[in-house]
Amino acid sequence: MSLIIAIVIALGLDYWLGEPKRLHPLVGFGGFADGLEKWLNSAQGLPAKQNDTLLKCKGVLALTLAIGPLGFAGYSLEQTLAGSPALTTLFAAVVLYLAIGWRSLIEHAKAISIPLSQGDLSAARIAVSRIVSRDTQELNEQEIAKAATESVLENGADALFAALFWFIVAGIPGVVIYRLSNTLDAMWGYKNSRFLHFGWAAARFDDLLNFIPARLTALAYTLCGSVNGQTQNAWQSWRQQAGTWKSPNAGPVMAAGAGAIGVELGGSAQYHGQNQERPTLGSGSAPMAASIDDACNLVNNSLVLWLAVICLIAFMGIV
């Protein structure tokens, strides 16, 4: 019961307060991670193969130094508070609140869909540039909607469901380690000359932690596709298209999500001035402003499903 109470409090805090505007712990962690990267991300004067191996080893060290102490601190605090269930629940709720981004995700999506539905492409481009890494200056209406819809579906898994999963499985240290890992992947997980080898460990560790939550999210998206009569479409999209995507975890999530809201995602996109042709995800109409709202509704419906399952599991005494 304390688990459910902590989750409800965390979601309530996020719904009413949103992300902290000041002094968010992840901002401080990001600064610490930047310092680690500047300190360790170099391996000059060695043959290329040895250089790459050394950078990977340094990436493992950086990942350990960034996550290990804070994960242990979370475990220690959880054990220290174990004698007081009320304090443990409250502290766990606050930690989970800081780890999720439900309201922020929906707000960013609405900041795109509203001007886009009003024909204000300039405002929509600015808003979508805040949540995607592709070039947004020349995007048309359909491309803006596609970028935003993809981001909502993928980040629903990363910013909400994976955090809930690891909180349920491993409590405070679990959600702390997951959120820090996901942050490091966002900072170091680029496949460019600077991070290809140094960021390898962070990217692979994040892939590992997201493997099960991503598929549970895809399952929730598929089941909630029944609201639009798209469950079969979601299942077929997941089964046939997930493996074609470059990310092993984003593929199932985005394919099932696209199928569940009946749109076709993927295709051409510009990144750093270069065009990339990506596999098709989902099946249905071209995305538009309403597709962004549909993706938000899918995330919300999936959250309701998750909460129902969590309550059922707790009632059965499994967690």
Image (cartoon, rainbow, N blue to C red):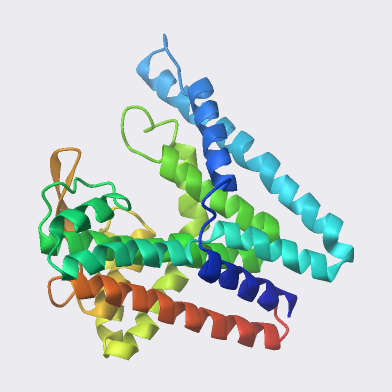
Examine the rendered structure and indicate whether residue 33 appears above or below residue 143.
above
Q: Residue at x 51, y 51 (%)?
A: 21
Q: Residue at x 27, y 91 (%)?
A: 229
Picture quadrant where residue 200 is located: top left
What x and y, as percent, mark residue 226?
Answer: 33, 89
What x and y, as percent, mark residue 72?
Answer: 73, 46
Residue 14 in view here: yes
Residue 239 in view here: no
> Which residue is at the front of the view, 16 or 155?
16
> Which residue is at the front of the view, 46 or 286?
286
Describe residue 10's horizontal placement relative to residue 204 as left or right.
Answer: right
- Outermost right residue: 83
- Outermost top residue: 45
What x and y, as percent, mark residue 285?
Answer: 13, 76
What x and y, as percent, mark residue 186?
Answer: 42, 45
Picture quadrant where residue 319 is located: bottom right
Examine the rendered structure and indicate whether residue 31 appears above or below residue 279.
above
Q: Residue at x 75, y 53 (%)?
A: 75
Which quadrant does the N terminus fall into? bottom right
Picture quadrant where residue 260 is located: bottom left
Describe residue 200's horizontal placement relative to residue 26 as left or right.
Answer: left
